[in-house]
Image: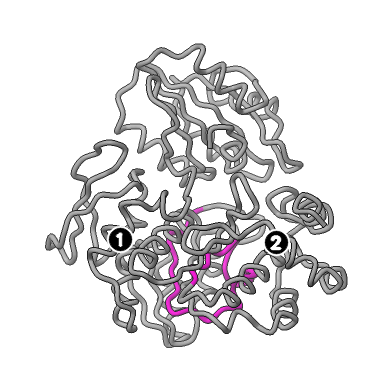
């Protein structure tokens, strides 16, 4: 098969959560365990760090990978969903898995895949683990897809587990309360494996403490020890001050410029501290170098990514209540005359919690992602009226961006946010 034929096979034959939603979710690890056994258990052949959480797990994973790369380690990175290309999901030292590697993996294992009928995500996890094992990475940073306890990635025994934050998302699968969601995320905490919690959240701290006690795991709340202070933003990078226990340790410059990245960076630094305690050799200079060029080193996209200036045009993959809240806070850093917001989402989000947060003085372009799981732009626009949000329907995100630029002045701000999938369809990403 060609690469395109291989992708067509994957998308057509295997249920894919990002496209069809809950019908693709497998609430157990059986398929992943069978696939890994078929592949001679590659998950046991490399060291790893496991990252879960509602928001921030992608940025945290990329930040950790950038630092390990900067320290000279051959570093695997598994993340999801991809924005532009399937191969983004599996990388070593920032280089995506080749199309030929994807074709070869499917070709070698197609008969077994046909018998097993795994989900799209289960298969990509197996592919990533097989690739990392064969390429003999020193370490792999593994981001969960959805939840933690029953996530396909949860067959690894990592060096360190990391949980970024807990907020409402995928409530139909993970639970209707923060504690229920936290219990699912806490499922990545393994016996006697240290765990870093990026931020102490009063509503769920007990869940993590109890799980750590149950598994005899040392738990670290990064926000108790490490704080990040804003200094300035210059040339698309943010200068920050890192404090430990209230004492300034050093300054660094990072291309993770969103305010919401402060908590992620605290978790990243604490994770590196623990990695060093476990025998890894990562210096402050490695931390500075890695965090300075996360996007370049790892290929991270869509996190408060500036597309152009005058008018300032930004995209962000924030797509749930906490993510939209973070975007609203980020907007306060900028001076602009008028805000144009291009927004689209999927059909299983709690629209009321999102729309209730949006500024009523912005002008909205209601669009929709080109996937079966989309929320129709007409429905989004109708719901938005309830919250006094004004705008127009332009279904395609690129056409909406073209129209926004036609209407915006150089002093305005254009934002594209609300779903990973509308950001992924931007031609400029």
Image quarter of the N terminus: bottom right
Q: CA distance from mark 1 to mark 2?
A: 35 Å
Q: Secondary structure at mark 2?
A: helix
Q: Which residue is mark 2?
A: 102
Residue 200 appears in the rendering: no
The mark total stands at: 2
> Is the residue 227 above or below the residue 36 in the image?
above
Residue 150: mark: none
Residue placed at 71% from the left, 31% from the top? 376
Query: Relative to 403, is 213 on the left or the right?
Result: left
Considering the whole magenta stretch, tell me its main secondary structure. loop
Report which quarter residue 35 is drawn in.
Answer: bottom right
Residue 329 appears in the rendering: yes
Question: Relative to the observer, which residue lies in front, 228 or 174?
Answer: 228
- Let me know if residue 29 is in the magenta part: no
Judged by depth in the image, the label closer to the viewer, 1 or 2, is: 2
Question: Relative to the observer, which residue lies in front, 104 or 140?
Answer: 104
Residue 227 horizontal/vertical position (percent): 23, 58
| Colour style of the rendered protein structure | one colour
Residue placed at 67% from the left, 45% from the top? 348
Residue 169 horizontal/vertical position (percent): 57, 52
Residue 266: mark: 1
Segment tinted magenta in the rendering: 140-167
Q: Secondary structure at mark 1?
A: helix
Query: Relative to 197, is 83 on the left or the right?
Result: right
Residue 57 horizontal/vertical position (percent): 47, 58
Report which quarter residue 297 is drawn in.
Answer: bottom left
Answer with mark 1 or mark 2, whichever residue precedes in sequence: 2
């Amino acid at each position: 098969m060609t690469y395109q034929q291989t992708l067509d096979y994957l998308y057509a034959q295997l249920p894919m959560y990002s496209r069809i939603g809950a019908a693709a979710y497998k609430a157990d690890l059986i398929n992943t365990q069978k696939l890994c056994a078929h592949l001679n258990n590659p998950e046991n052949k490399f060291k790893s760090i496991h990252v879960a959480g509602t928001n921030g797990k992608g940025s945290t994973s990329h930040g950790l990978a950038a630092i390990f790369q900067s320290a000279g380690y051959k570093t695997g990175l598994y993340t999801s969903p991809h924005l532009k290309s399937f191969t983004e999901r599996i990388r070593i030292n920032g280089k995506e898995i080749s199309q030929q590697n994807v074709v070869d993996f499917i070709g070698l294992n197609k008969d077994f895949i046909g018998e097993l009928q795994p989900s799209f995500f289960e298969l990509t996890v197996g592919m990533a683990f097989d690739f990392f094992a064969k390429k003999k990475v020193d370490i792999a940073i593994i981001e969960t897809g959805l939840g933690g306890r029953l996530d396909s990635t949860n067959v690894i025994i990592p060096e360190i587990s990391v949980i970024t934050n807990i907020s409402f998302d995928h409530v139909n699968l993970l639970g209707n309360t923060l504690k229920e969601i936290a219990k699912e995320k806490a499922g990545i905490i393994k016996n006697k494996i240290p765990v870093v919690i990026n931020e102490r959240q009063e509503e769920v701290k007990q869940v993590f403490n109890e799980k750590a006690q149950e598994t005899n795991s040392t738990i670290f709340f990064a926000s108790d020890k490490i704080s990040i202070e804003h200094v300035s933003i210059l040339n698309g990078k943010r200068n920050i001050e890192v404090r430990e226990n209230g004492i300034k340790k050093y300054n660094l410059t990072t291309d993770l410029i969103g305010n919401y990245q402060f908590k992620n960076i605290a978790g990243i630094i604490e994770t590196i501290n623990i990695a060093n305690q476990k025998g890894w050799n990562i210096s402050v200079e490695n931390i500075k170098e890695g965090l300075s060029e996360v996007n370049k080193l790892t290929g991270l996209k869509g996190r408060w990514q500036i597309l152009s200036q005058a008018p300032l045009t930004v995209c962000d993959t924030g797509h749930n209540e906490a993510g939209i809240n973070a975007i609203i806070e980020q907007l306060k850093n900028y001076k602009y005359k008028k805000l144009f917001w291009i927004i689209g989402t999927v059909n299983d989000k709690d629209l009321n919690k999102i729309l209730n947060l949006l500024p009523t003085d912005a002008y909205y372009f209601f669009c929709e992602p080109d996937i079966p799981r989309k929320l129709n732009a007409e429905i989004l626009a109708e719901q938005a009226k309830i919250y006094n949000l004004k705008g127009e329907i332009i279904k395609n995100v690129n056409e909406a961006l073209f129209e926004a630029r036609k209407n915006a002045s150089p002093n305005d701000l254009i934002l594209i946010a609300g779903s990973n999938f509308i950001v992924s369809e931007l031609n400029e990403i």
